[in-house]
Amino acid sequence: MITNITLYHVQLPMKFTFKTAKGEVSVRDTLIVRLEDEAGYVGYGECVAFVDPFYTKETLASCWDTLCTRYLPNLLGQETTTTLPQQWLMEGMPMTVASVENALLHLQCHRLGVNTVEYVLQQSLLPTVPTGIVIGDVPLDTLVDAVSGYVSQGCQRIKLKVSPKDGYERVQRVRSVYPDLTLAVDANQSYTYEDRDKVQALQGFHLACIEEPFQIQSLKMYHQYKSTHEWGIMTPICLDESILGYDDLVYAHRHGLLDVLNVKVGRLGGLRETAKVIQYCRDHGIQYWIGSMVESSISKWMHVQLAALGDAYMPGDLSDSLRYFERDLTRPPIISTIKNCSTERLSQFVEVPNGAGLGVDVDIEALETYCIHKKLWHL
């Protein structure tokens, strides 16, 4: 039985301001759900919504309100084997739902002595995964040096944040130095349909994918536009924030709106929905890979484990905790290892934990240090 619930509002200072076409983050506010049962077993989940609604309509404040007034009070006193009401997933709050479900699943798997991702996906994990770096909207004259620094450390995939302002020049500069690097771009829906020629121009750079190029008001409107205009974009289109659950994926696939999917547990409504999404991708030949939300390691370790399923399209947005934060919320934090794969090349990997529940320990001292507000429920 769930006897104690704590909701933390945490502020993690960042080492740099992460900029995209839609917004920027210099302090990562995030919500952590802690569930405890009568035997002292604990599970944690993270709500990865941002303060402002530049990614999806969910915000930190709306998630806090929903968790405090409805979701968490209803969970107190429930058995640890309970499943969340399906109705919650229909309310447009997938990141809020995911934080509760992930905490509940980690608690259940902690009791069972099994790893949560292995248990839900019914698949063992690889021991390591390659790293991938996202480079935000840094000054153009520093871009190549930034890429070179990560490539020299063995990073196997770079993703650039781009916009109509200078996206072509950014990709051109990196490609001229690294013609064989696995390179992707993320436009965060910054191009209009009238900018289609600018998106088409990128296909000569042999990108792994273009993520969320267009300002999509809805998948239906996207389909209407694509079906009534000459398309001419050969680079694989990857969708991220346009896909907020399983039904969105099915619609996008049936109407030919994507080639690749960025998988994020919070955006999809939790690990069980994520498992359904991954299976749909496998069944229908949709490439998928694992993204990230500049979140704490409580959420990010789960994404590292999903990348270890072994069939991701490319290395994910998965890099060291200490790239972003002076201190993260788990022990250990996410730390990469550089390996010599040949006399000419280094490769950077993260070792994948597969212990019970989350697979690592939550750093309670760090959680309390960075907590600025919390709410508790007790039986």
Image (cartoon, helix red, strand yellow):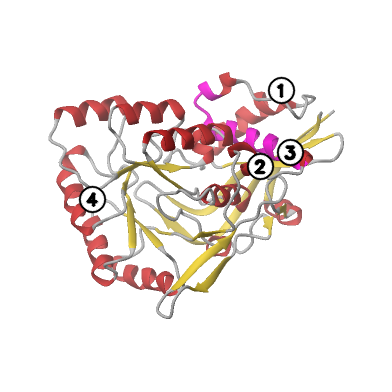
**Where is the C terminus found, in terms of image quarters?**
top right
Q: How many numbered dots are placed on residues in this image?
A: 4
Pointer 1 local density, CA inside 10 Å: few below 14, some 14–19, many at least 20:
few
At label 2, the amino acid type is Thr
What SS does tag 3 mark? Answer: helix
Which label belongs to residue 107? 3
| Mark closer to the chain start, 1 or 3 | 1
Q: Nearer the viewer, mark 1 or mark 3?
A: 3
Pointer 4 local density, CA inside 10 Å: few below 14, some 14–19, many at least 20:
some
Residue 102 in the magenta stretch? The answer is yes
Image quadrant of residue 241?
Answer: top left
Circle 1 sits on which residue? 74
| Mark closer to the chain start, 2 or 1 | 1
State how far apart marks 4 and 2 are (Cα): 41 Å
Lateral position of residue 304 relative to residue 191, left or right: right
Lateral position of residue 189 relative to residue 43, left or right: left
Q: Are marks 3 and 2 in contact (CB under 8 Å)?
A: no
State how far apart marks 2 and 1 are (Cα): 23 Å
Q: Are marks 1 and 3 in contact (CB under 8 Å)?
A: no
Which label belongs to residue 116? 2
The magenta segment: 89-110
Pointer 2 local density, CA inside 10 Å: few below 14, some 14–19, many at least 20:
many
Circle 4 sits on which residue? 164
| Mark closer to the chain start, 1 or 4 | 1
